[in-house]
Image (cartoon, coloured by chain):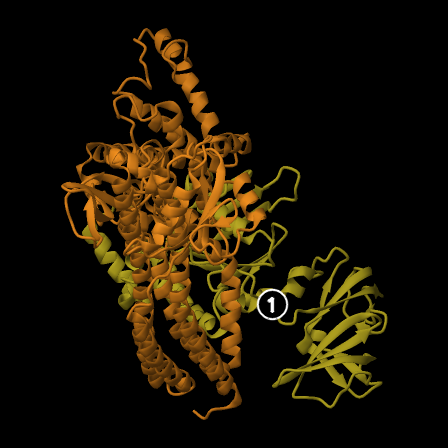
């Protein structure tokens, strides 16, 4: 297993267009499971294809271990890739699919036999070896795709939304297996997803991508608890963080506040004044009787989820979502008092970058 | 199942089908008898007129007849023992045989004069009576014929009752349990088939009787003419009495007509005694051989009833589930526009070809006798047939070669290269051009002196060849034309196939470490197997049917080296006029191609089942 290092990668598909990858740098340690999280079009898949060698970056360097592979063909990079739609060869049996990568490398037949057997045993594919992909369920196909990667014993695994095509119960089951597999193999894995729940549960570290750039790299706790900018704050979490536009006043004083129109929130401002983004997660918004707390807001919508309820509130045209336990007796149009947990306020500057 | 109003309606429909079918089957016989009576009357009128023209001596002036003699000869027909046609002879408009009978309408006589041909007056045939020069119409001969009812009429009545009872029971069984309905319909079908058979037998008998009666009457006329004109006793001079028949020297025999084969053709014949020890034979094509179509119709009509009852039974079952009925009807409705042309333009000719292949069918012969498998036997004996099949099999070998080329070009053009679109069009162009135009272009290219190819050959200091005229190169030259024409189409289909292969497969193979050849050999080629199979089967079938290029460029030569099987079919039909043999050959080719296509699908289909 090897580390994967990306240095200042830029990739454009069309000379005039916005770059798919924009001066992107990232390091994945040997044996680490790094999740690349971002909305569609953020460059996650392009990044993976550049590492695999299926695309060549216009600028920058890619290292696998100590070796520079930027311009090497995919076959010699010694990485394995799992595709979103599995890409199992439909005319070959499961056994031949798994063995393919070894056969084209002229691995001796007895060793192929042994390694395919091992991989199949590890992924529970023993009974399916003679079947064709068309005869398998979605989960089984994904296991075969994993088997095809595992059997190669590559330097790194590249997984492109491998669970996106599965239904929810299958997905969480396979996710657990995948983590166990990664631990057991000590494999370096880059895992692309746009599902932030998947990212939170899987990753030792998460890299959040947007518009071809890395916005933040960190543990799930860091990314969730201390988002580096407004994009990450909004993208991570379900629902994402509330980010209200406002103006900061009284920087450096004890009475410094952020004025968000319908809501004036006391917040510690060190030095920055002027336009500001105030972030607060829904679970850190408390509701009470009208005229209590930092302000009184009108209820726009109530969405009971069971254990808790999302209450959407109107802040002078902006929306503030509160997550409150149970099912409160609220209706749209009601006036409620709002309290924000001061310990969990996030402040971003006008450009969206985190303040302190 | 209880008999609801719906079922009652279906039962009524079934009953109607039974009744209509019985009516049609029974009506067959009188209709057919009328047809043969009319044909017989027409022939009798013509024969009698020819007889009278031959035996009546001339009058004192001009080319007319001696009227008293004509009168005597006409009246004598009545007295001729065994003469069965009822004839009337008119001189001008005056009846001679039954002198008190009605005059011939003068318009009718004028009509005969304007257009001297046999006509049907409603209850008899009217043939013009020419003067002795055969120039002017001086009168007419009317003839009526009656064919005997025969003992089969009783049979028909008996079987009809039987079929009606069985049909009634079957109609009653509509709406009952499927098993009971099926059994009743089966019984009815047997009865209806019997009815059809009896009706067909009646038709057949009427046809046979019409031939026999004409032979008998004409025999009497010939004998009478020989007696009256001892000088004209030779068979050829008497033959005018029997047009559409043959009068040849023959052996002695009785008055009863017989059936036998003459030079492979069935003939009805009777011995004619011209003078003591001097016999002739009168031969004609037996009408019953030409009646096969009517026989088939009679049998088929009888089976309409069982079909109708089956339909009604299905309708009764389906109307219990109206949605099912509607959907089935709608389904057939949608199918009809495409199924009907297929049946009419493919199915029917195929069946007709099968019929032709079992008959001697030549454009120069009036009858088309059944010959069994003789046409097929001829194919086996004809060395040119084997040769043409071998040539076609050899010619077909260009298909795999052009497929390889087409795939290579398609792989090249599949990349989004500059000019790929224009090149694609250029490759497809020959496929869309007229076959004759292409052949003419290649004719110019292959020309032995001054053709582009030989010019190039000469420039390379090689000896030029007569590409299309040399037995060693002619077929190869044609194969090159074939490959060139089809390359574009095959390339296009391959291109579509290539674009249908998801890129992820090739990406996965690249990451797995497969080089370009391994990706092609192990991913692309197997995934293209259905395309290859399609192109191979259609290509081989198409190549086997090559005609235009051969017709234009070589005409099967030199010395039959390019004589392929379709060319053989063409020649047998349109140059030799042997449609029976042609149909046999065409069916053999059809079978060979069918077997080849099946084998190809089996061979290539195994492993690519789900690709």
Report which colour depicts chain A: yellow
Q: Which image quarter: residue B390?
A: top left
- B479 in relation to A61, above or below: above
Residue B25: x %, y % from top left:
39, 69
Q: Residue furthest bottom?
A: B2
Circle 1 sits in a helix, a strand or a loop, which is it?
helix
Q: Please tell me whether residue B462 is drawn above or below residue B145 in the rendered image.
A: above
From the top left corner, tell me how far across and down residue A155 is, in percent.
Answer: 37, 51
Which is more toward the observer, B293 or B28?
B28
Q: Position of residue B395 (x, y in %)?
A: 30, 32
Q: Quadrant of residue A206?
A: bottom right
Residue placed under numbered mark 1 in the picture: A224
Q: Is residue B256 visible?
A: yes
Residue depicted at 41% across the width and 58% down the height? B35
Residue B71 point in image, percent of width and height = 41, 46
Check the picture and name the quadrant holding the N terminus of chain B.
bottom left
Chain in orange on the image? B
The one nearer the camera, B438 or B315, is B315
Chain to which mark 1 belongs: A
């Amino acid at each position: 297993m090897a580390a994967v290092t990306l240095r200042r990668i830029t990739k454009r598909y069309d000379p005039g267009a916005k770059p798919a990858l924009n001066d992107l740098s990232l390091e994945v340690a040997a044996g680490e499971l790094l999740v690349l999280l971002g909305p569609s079009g953020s460059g996650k898949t392009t990044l993976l294809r550049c590492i695999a060698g299926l695309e060549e970056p216009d600028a920058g360097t890619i290292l696998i271990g100590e070796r520079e592979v930027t311009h090497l063909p995919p076959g010699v990079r010694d990485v394995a890739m799992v595709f979103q739609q599995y890409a199992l060869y439909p005319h070959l049996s499961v056994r031949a699919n798994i063995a393919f990568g070894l056969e084209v490398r002229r691995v001796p037949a007895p060793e192929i036999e042994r390694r395919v057997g091992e991989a199949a045993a590890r992924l529970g594919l023993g009974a399916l070896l003679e079947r064709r992909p068309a005869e398998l369920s979605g989960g089984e196909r994904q296991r075969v795709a994993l088997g095809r990667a595992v059997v190669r014993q590559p330097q790194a695994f590249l997984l492109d939304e491998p669970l996106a095509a599965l239904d929810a119960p299958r997905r969480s089951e396979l996710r657990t297996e995948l983590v166990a597999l990664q631990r057991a193999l000590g494999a370096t894995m880059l895992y692309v997803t746009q599902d932030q729940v998947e990212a939170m549960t899987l990753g030792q570290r998460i890299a959040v991508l947007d518009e071809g750039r890395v916005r933040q790299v960190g543990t799930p706790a860091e990314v969730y608890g201390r988002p580096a900018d407004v994009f990450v704050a909004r993208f991570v979490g379900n629902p994402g963080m509330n980010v209200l536009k406002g103006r900061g006043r009284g920087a450096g004083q004890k009475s410094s506040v952020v004025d968000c129109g319908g809501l004036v929130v006391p917040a510690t401002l060190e030095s920055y004044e002027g336009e500001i983004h105030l972030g607060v997660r829904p679970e850190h918004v408390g509701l009470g009787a009208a005229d209590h707390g930092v302000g009184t807001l009108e209820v726009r919508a109530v969405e009971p989820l069971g254990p808790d309820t999302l209450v959407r509130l109107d802040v002078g045209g902006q929306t503030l979502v509160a997550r409150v336990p149970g099912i409160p007796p609220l209706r749209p149009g009601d006036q409620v008092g709002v309290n924000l947990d001061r310990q969990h306020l996030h402040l971003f500057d006008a450009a969206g970058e985190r303040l302190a | 199942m209880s008999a609801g109003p719906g079922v009652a309606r279906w039962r009524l429909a079934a009953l109607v089908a039974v009744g209509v079918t019985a009516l049609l089957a029974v009506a067959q016989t009188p209709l057919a008898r009328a047809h043969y009576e009319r044909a017989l009357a027409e022939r009798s009128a013509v024969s009698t007129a020819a007889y009278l023209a031959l035996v009546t001596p001339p009058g004192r002036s001009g080319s007319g007849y001696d009227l008293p003699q004509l009168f005597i000869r006409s009246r004598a027909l009545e007295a001729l023992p065994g003469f069965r046609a009822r004839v009337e002879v008119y001189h001008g408009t005056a009846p001679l045989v039954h002198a008190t009978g009605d005059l011939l309408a003068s318009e009718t006589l004028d009509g005969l004069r304007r257009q001297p041909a046999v006509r049907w007056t409603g209850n008899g045939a009217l043939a013009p009576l020419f003067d002795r020069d055969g120039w002017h119409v001086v009168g007419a001969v009317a003839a009526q014929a009656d064919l005997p009812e025969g003992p089969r009429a009783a049979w028909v009545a008996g079987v009809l009752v039987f079929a009606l009872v069985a049909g009634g029971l079957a109609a009653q069984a509509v709406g009952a349990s499927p098993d009971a309905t099926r059994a009743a319909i089966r019984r009815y079908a047997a009865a209806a088939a019997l009815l059809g058979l009896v009706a067909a037998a009646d038709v057949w008998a009427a046809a046979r009787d019409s031939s026999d009666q004409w032979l008998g009457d004409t025999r009497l006329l010939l004998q009478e003419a020989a007696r009256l004109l001892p000088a004209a006793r030779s068979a050829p001079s008497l033959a005018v009495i029997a047009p559409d028949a043959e009068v040849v020297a023959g052996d002695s025999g009785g008055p009863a007509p017989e059936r036998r084969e003459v030079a492979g053709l069935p003939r009805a014949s009777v011995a004619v005694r011209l003078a003591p020890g001097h016999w002739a034979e009168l031969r004609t094509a037996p009408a019953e051989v030409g009646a096969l179509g009517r026989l088939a119709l009679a049998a088929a009509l009888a089976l309409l009833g069982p079909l109708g009852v089956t339909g009604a039974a299905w309708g009764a079952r389906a109307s219990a589930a109206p949605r099912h009925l509607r959907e089935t009807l709608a389904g057939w409705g949608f199918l009809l526009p495409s199924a009907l042309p297929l049946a009419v333009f493919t199915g029917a000719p195929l069946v007709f070809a099968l019929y032709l292949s079992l008959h001697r069918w030549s454009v120069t012969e009036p009858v088309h006798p059944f010959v069994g498998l003789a046409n097929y036997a001829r194919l086996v004996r004809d060395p040119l047939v084997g040769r043409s099949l071998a040539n076609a099999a050899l010619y077909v070998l260009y298909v795999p070669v052009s497929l390889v080329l087409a795939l290579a070009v398609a792989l090249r053009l599949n990349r989004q290269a500059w000019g790929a679109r224009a090149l694609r069009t250029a490759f497809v162009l020959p496929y869309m051009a007229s076959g004759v135009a292409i052949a003419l272009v290649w004719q110019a290219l292959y020309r032995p002196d001054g053709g582009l190819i030989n010019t190039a050959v000469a420039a390379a200091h090689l000896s030029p060849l007569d590409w299309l005229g040399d037995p060693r190169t002619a077929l190869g030259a044609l194969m090159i034309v074939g490959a060139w024409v089809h390359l574009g189409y095959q390339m296009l289909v391959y291109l579509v196939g290539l674009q249908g292969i998801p890129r992820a497969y090739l990406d996965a193979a690249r990451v797995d470490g497969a080089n370009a050849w391994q990706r092609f050999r192990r991913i692309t080629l197997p995934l293209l197997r259905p395309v290859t199979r399609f192109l191979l089967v259609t290509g081989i079938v198409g190549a086997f049917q090559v005609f235009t290029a051969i017709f234009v460029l070589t005409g099967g030569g030199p010395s039959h080296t390019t004589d392929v099987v379709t060319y053989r079919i063409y020649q047998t039909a349109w140059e030799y006029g042997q449609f029976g043999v042609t149909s046999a050959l065409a069916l053999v080719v059809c079978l060979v191609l069918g077997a080849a296509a099946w084998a190809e699908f089996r061979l290539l289909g195994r492993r690519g089942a789900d690709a």
